Amino acid sequence: MIKYLLKCNNKHEFESWFSESKEYEKLKKNFLIECIFCGSKNIEKSIMAPNIFVTKKIKEKRFNSKEFNKIKKDLTKIKKFVEKNFEFVGKNFPREIREIYYDSKKNKNIYGTATLKEKLELEEEGIELVTIPWRENKEN
């Protein structure tokens, strides 16, 4: 598996996993990769640092208030996009995502909740998931 940082022509960046680099090239050539934010199919790989395993304990990153507020704002944007463009299926998420995955005729965007055990079972079946830190509407 290989993870790429992708960027659309509207400058949205997102990550995606591929079984190998050739898979990315094939999907890109056939316009099967699209931006998760705007749907653009004009996608390029962006510069991405490789994963490096460090044996020393890494210090916890502390964010200043400006960085923290930007992260909160970005997470709020993502949440609004998901709520507008995806159907909330709640605790039925594992069942619903399996129906979509195994029935090629079904194609809809959903979001919901799953336990860690359910997430691991879905990943074992080859169903890729994205977990987004969800901000409550009442948070500042």
Image: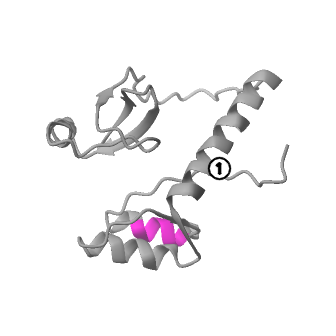
Q: Residue 33 in the image: x percent, y percent?
A: 28, 43
How packed mark 1 is, by other alpha carbons closer than 10 Å (few <14, some 14-19, many 20 or more), is few
Magenta stretch holds residue 72: no
In this picture, residue 26 sits left or right of residue 39: left
Along the line of sight, the residue nearer the viewer: 18 or 53: 18
> Which residue is disc 1 drawn over?
133
In this picture, residue 125 sits left or right of residue 114: left
Q: Is residue 22 above or below residue 7?
A: below
Q: Is residue 60 visible?
A: no
Which SS does the magenta portion mostly show?
A: helix
Q: Residue 81 in the image: x percent, y percent?
A: 56, 49
Q: Residue 64 in the image: x percent, y percent?
A: 80, 22
Q: Which residues are magenta?
A: 117-122
Along the line of sight, the residue nearer the viewer: 30 or 46: 30
Instruction: Please state, as top left, top right, bottom left or bottom right, where the C terminus lies in the image.
Output: top right
Along the line of sight, the residue nearer the viewer: 109 or 94: 109
Question: For residue 43, which quarter of the picture?
Answer: top left
Q: Residue 98 in the image: x percent, y percent?
A: 37, 74
Q: Is residue 58 above or below residue 40?
A: above
Instruction: Please state, as top left, top right, bottom left or bottom right, where the N terminus lies in the image.
Output: top left
Q: Is residue 75 above or below residue 112?
A: above
- Amino acid type shown at disc 1: Pro
What residue sits 71% from the left and 27% below the top?
61
What residue sits 50% from the left and 61% below the top?
86
Q: Secondary structure at mark 1?
A: loop
Q: Is residue 6 visible?
A: yes
What residue sits 77% from the left and 55% below the top?
136
Along the line of sight, the residue nearer the viewer: 61 or 43: 43
Count the marks: how many?
Answer: 1
